[in-house]
Image (tube, rainbow, N blue to C red):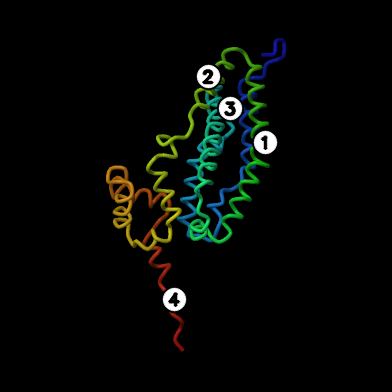
Amino acid sequence: MTVGRPKKAKADWLREIVGRTNRAFAKLPEPYWLKGDWPAWVQNVGRELSKTYFPTAKLKVSQQWEPGEVGAMLGQHIAYLYSLEDMWQASEKNVSWKQLRLTYGKDIRQRAQDYDRKFRRQFLPDLERAVKFALTLAIEQDYLPCSKFFAAFGRAIERRVSSTGDIGRTNTQIYVLLLIAWRSVEKLGSIPKLHQVLCKIFGNQPAGTVKRIERICERIGLSYREIAQREVPTKSPQK
């Protein structure tokens, strides 16, 4: 707390934090699973996964921000980033590049390394500066907004990703499966058959009903009618 320094209006200091954090996330590289000449529905799955991995990455500057909201968002950013780093380190030990090349293409290893380099050299340092800026600015405020900010920040930073967290939800597990095995998914031919496969993999209750899978497919744009039309060979004009 800095005694005697003029305090910023609530909207001003919160908007400064949100703006600075947004500028840092603008440098977040696009995940390598979104790159490639894939069907539109597969690209949509990748975007849904990105929303799950970075649920608060896109912040809208608003005059209605409250100290607790901004503190919680900042804390959740940090918790998710540390959790994902642990997951990447664990997965690297058992990674099968041969299998990944079949799914993502021959250049997957290079793309993954490029992403990791941009993530660590461009994004993380800028986010670290944004966090230090936010914490310094927050502690200079009056006691009540300062306490609300740090109370929410503390609760959110403890929300690490686990098997029961957002990334462990069945929806997300289904998205991962659809992304990795998209070629096999397209060959199933219908949503009921896709539902049967998901029930075998995840169990009847976690997979849910056919209607639930229909809603997921509608959200990501997976249409077996369109797949069938795409795979019909175009007839060459008769001479």
Q: Earlier in the sequence, mark 2 or mark 3?
A: 3
Cα distance, mark 4 to mark 2? 62 Å
Cα distance, mark 4 to mark 3? 55 Å
Residue at the right extreme?
5
Tell me the residue that label 2 is attached to: 151
Question: What kind of element bears circle 4?
Answer: loop
Q: Horizontal placement of 191 versus 130: left or right?
A: left
Which is in the foreground here, disc 4 or disc 3? 4
Q: Earlier in the sequence, mark 2 or mark 1?
A: 1
State if disc 3 and disc 1 touch (CB < 8 Å): no
Tell me the residue that label 1 is attached to: 126
Q: Amino acid at mark 3?
A: Gln
Residue 7 x, y percent position in the rendering: 67, 16
State if disc 3 and disc 4 touch (CB < 8 Å): no
Tell me the residue that label 4 is attached to: 234
Q: Which mark is residue 63?
A: 3
Is residue 232 positioned above or below 192 on the image? below
Residue 129 x, y percent position in the rendering: 68, 31
Cα distance, mark 1 to mark 4? 51 Å
Which is in the foreground here, disc 1 or disc 3? 1
Residue at the top extreme?
4
Residue 219 x, y percent position in the rendering: 41, 49
Q: Amino acid at mark 2?
A: Ala
Is residue 162 positioned above or below 223 on the image? above
Which is in the foreground here, disc 1 or disc 4? 1
